[in-house]
Image (cartoon, helix red, strand yellow):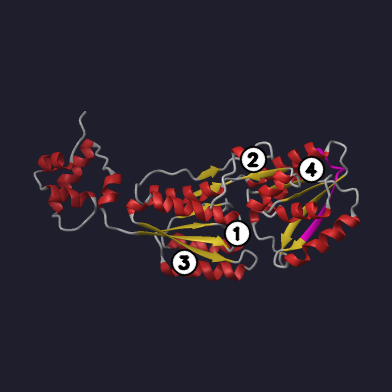
Amino acid sequence: MSRIRIKDIAQMADVSVGTVDRVLHGRSGVSEASRKRVEEILKQLDYQPNMYASALASNKQYTYACLLPQHEASEYWTDIEAGIREATLAYSDFNIQADVTHYDPYDYHSFEQASQQIVEKQPDGVLLAPTAPQYTYPFVEQLNLLHIPYIYIDSNIQEQPALSFFGQHSHQSGFFAARMLMLLAGKNATEIAIFRKINEGVVGSNQQERREIGFREYMERHHPTCHIWELDLHAKRDTEDTQMLDDFFKAHPTLHNGITFNSKAYIIGEYLHKRGIADFNLMGYDLLKRNVECLKGGTISFLIAQQPTLQGFNGIKTLCDHLILKKEVNRINFMPIDLLTRENIEFYYKPIN
């Protein structure tokens, strides 16, 4: 069957092309009788409008609000923002704009204030990292009331589902990390360490908490007698890291294996290099430049990557697919759990300038 044109529909309904166009786009200026004739023919033909062409023809501008944690240059969230910029450029024909707002991940009131600012602006869509579920709930409930679609990246809240989620399966990632670390440690290992970055009892991300839950589940199941030491470094007082690590390793001289579930494994990796400690197996997350340098230098054994640039890109793309192109979108989109070593890092890592 040949492609049905708007001109063909107009002839069949005995109306103008402009009338058919107004019916298709829900605009006014059409009599009830003409509207019914056009709609009946559309139904008979099972006509599917070309949403791509319609979107290009529209002058509407779409604004997306992106709510992300504050971060320094070259950190994990820098790659997320790079993906957002790439998607905004790729979909620039649709007049989209992505406005990024930051909040302090260690200050829940900061999230509340930033999210309220977004609600007041009433954007067309929202992209957010729900690092603190208890403070995300009231925000997304307001978005639901306003019929504003939202995308989760990095962390997911199953109890309050978004239009779509992009990120790793955090629990499974932690479970996998434990298995990999214990391959390095050996079946007879009696102790390992978990390093955290904490500010006033706040880890900064529920994803890190879920990774640790998965990690501990594996350890309890397969290495129940292996003791897990913990060291909580100050998230906002980096100057104290060296002394705290000195004290920790002095107190545990036989410790040779450890992991951190945040993206700053380089803090421990650089410390190991500075102190000349070569017999320690360290695992971490994310391809920050300093993490990669430690991986290549041998003070980090494994890094788990989660493709943050793709998360940012796909988040914006999904909002465009849903709002502009009227496509069905997948609700859950797990990113791969990629294990990187100094032997394969060159095939994976491409630093963003």
Write the start and end of the magenta stretch as one range. Answer: 221-232
Of callouts 2 and 4, the N-terminal one = 4
Asked whether the viewer can see residue 121, the reply is: yes
Find the distance from the CA under tag 3 to the CA under tag 2.
Answer: 38 Å
Of callouts 1 and 2, the N-terminal one = 1
Kindly identify the amino acid type of the residue bearing the numbered disc 3.
Ile
What number of labels is visible? 4
Element under disc 4: helix
Residue behind mark 1:
133
Q: In this view of the protein, which residue sits in the foreground, 224 or 174? A: 174
Kindly identify the amino acid type of the residue bearing the numbered disc 4.
Met
Q: Which residue shows up at 15% across the image and 53% down it?
A: 32
Find the distance from the CA under tag 1 to the CA under tag 2.
Answer: 33 Å
Q: Residues within 10 Å of mark 4 (few under 14, many from 20)?
A: some
Locate residue 317 relative to residue 250 in the image: left or right: left
Find the distance from the CA under tag 4 to the CA under tag 3.
Answer: 42 Å
Find the distance from the CA under tag 3 to the CA under tag 1.
Answer: 17 Å
Residue behind mark 2:
345
Residue 219 tag number: 4
Give the vertical position of 261 relative to 119 (above or below).
above
In the rendered structure, does residue 227 fall within the stretch colored magenta?
yes
Which of labels 3 and 2 is toward the front? 2
Residue 118 tag number: 3
| Circles 3 and 2: CB atoms closer than 8 Å | no
Q: Residues within 10 Å of mark 1 (few under 14, many from 20)?
A: some
Q: Position of residue 232 (x, y in %)?
A: 77, 60
Element under disc 1: helix
Q: Position of residue 310 (x, y in %)?
A: 51, 46
Q: Residues within 10 Å of mark 2 (few under 14, many from 20)?
A: some
